[in-house]
Amino acid sequence: MDRSLEVYDDILDLLPDVDHPTPLVRINRLNPSPSFTLYAKLEWLNPFGSVKDRAAAYLVRDLERRGQLSATRGVVEPTSGNTGLSLAGMCAARGYRVRAVVPNKVPLEKKVLLRIAGADLDVVNDELCPSPGMGEGSINFAKSRAKAQGDVYALPNQYENEENARAHYETTAPEIWRQTEGRITHLFVSLGTCGTVTGCARFLRERNPRLKVIAVQPTEGHDVPGLRNVAQLDVSKLFDPSLIDEILEIDFELAYTRALDLARREGLMAGPSSGLIYEGARRIVERDREGVGVMVFADNVFKYVTNMVKHVPELAEGTSA
Amino acid sequence: MSDYTHPEVLVSTDWVRDHVGKPGIKLVEVDVDTKAYEAGHIPGAVGFNWQTQLQDQVNRDIVGKEAFESLLGSGGIANGDTVVLYGDNNNWFAAYAFWLFKIYGHKEVRLMNGGRVKWLNESDKTLTVDLPKITATRYTASQPDLKLRARVQDVIKAVEARSHNLVDVRSPDEFTGKVIAPPGMTETAQRGGHIPGARSVPWATAVNPDGTFKAADDLKEIYLKKAEVDPRRDTIAYCRIGERSSHTWFVLTYLLGLPNVRNYDGSWTEYGSMVGLPIER
């Protein structure tokens, strides 16, 4: 296979690695300090459209290595959509079935995309009136399926599976290290399963112990798909606070307005979680003034049109005759 | 350390594992998420749907006596059986079903301490999608014991006379009126807030992280000391539609032994929609 020709034998061959990274694009008009170089890593250029392709590939390969998947035994996974979509795409190519368990508030676009990709869907209500330790509806529901039908489903469980962090330790972080020629001073990430932050921070801290790892999180009661407020992080077993220098809590509505700024002033069609990361990075750049920062932009905006309209209603104005 | 007043109403997950399938023991799962039973349940358990089987399908009311008899009969439950209830969300609707079983006079009812989530997270416990083999029975219910139930008239009188402990078990945002219902819930009310004089004790305050009920001394601290629930007075517990408050009704009645606790199943969806009733925020 000659990757320079961009001809592939298998869709999975498009997965990035240190020799074929996802792009870093410099922020120009929205960068408040000329002596701070700020890059966005465009993870939506993964083959199935988001950063979750990396974790999903490691999860599937790990299950395959351990002989856990077959024509009759697929995967069931709790997901806010992107991991499910990555798994569905990969499993479609491999011939495994996928059942995605998604919270009800996941945008319609993602639910439909999961079905387009051939996944069966369980939609559960996650935020009824939770109590500590109860876990979330989608995670418990997926665990139930796996426990009741172990012959039909394996449960990768991205929230607890070290393969998720390993994917970023072995791909995302080495890519960033090489792409910045080791000059990176600041890493900006959001928190969900915490696979990205944990995997990347482990690798990059080994290379540069003074690297600042900054996580952004939306305010409580947020509506930013894929992200978690710290109060929601107890389900993320990969969350390791010792790897994070600062956690910025940012008004979740800014996720939407900053995503618009990125589209309109940088030409980056970034999704709301990237909008939130950008706002966090902007604040740190204004404070620190100098450095080389990388923001991991998990997804573009296309799957979040419903959410964008909900939070920026004027986007819908003038859209009908 | 004191014990619960009626510890016999609780069974552990280990007890259920050891007794499931034995004669006279019947297991019933009742979930908020009515799809959960189908995704996997304890072997031998029947599933009751709170939306279609525990409520009257025409009037807004609890299931009628005949329908309750028919439900239990078709579930293979006999009058003398010991019924063990469990469900998701730390037994919200299992507690509601417990309350209904008591209203209709079933003698031996238990709640599986920790509910579905505790069972799910224990490696020596199994789940199945196979439906149990059921031999139907002829079940006879008692006339409903309405002392366990508060109606809106009872609540109005209690507010006017300031005669009762009123315990609001909803989330803090529902209590203050910031939201009328938890996100995604279809049952709602015209106004947000709480019943005047009610104390806010969210239902989850009563449970440990593993889903089991907190120890008696902790429960006393929470309800009797902090929330100043006066055990000499009658008590009304309410939430949005009466399921979370069944959980608190169970705690106050059986674990703390308070006399005359009623569950107001009309709850906020009724009170918060009535014209002219006083609301606090």
Image: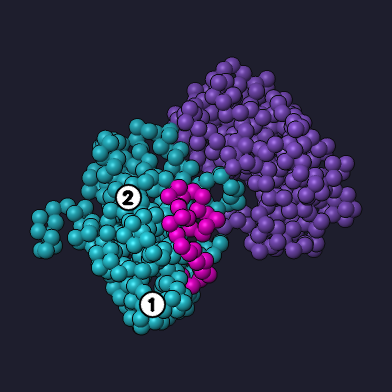
- Tell me the element at label 2: helix
Queried whether the magenta region covers residue A250, the answer comes back as yes
**Which chain hosts label 1?**
A
**Which chain hosts label 2?**
A
Classify 10 Å Cα crowding around label 2: few (below 14), some (14-19), many (20 and above).
many
Give the magenta-colored segment's residue range: A228-257
Kindly report which numbered mark, 2 or 1, lies closer to the viewer in this rendering: 1
On residue A290, which mark appears? Answer: 1
Q: Amino acid at mark 2?
A: Arg
Observer able to see residue B231: yes
The reply, left or right, for residue B128 in relation to residue B168 is left
Residue B261 falls in which quadrant of the image? top right
First of labels 2, 1 by sequence position: 2
The image shows residue A43, relative to residue B127, as above or below, that is below
Residue B209 image point, x, y percent: 59, 42
Q: Determine contact: label 2, label 1, CB under 8 Å.
A: no
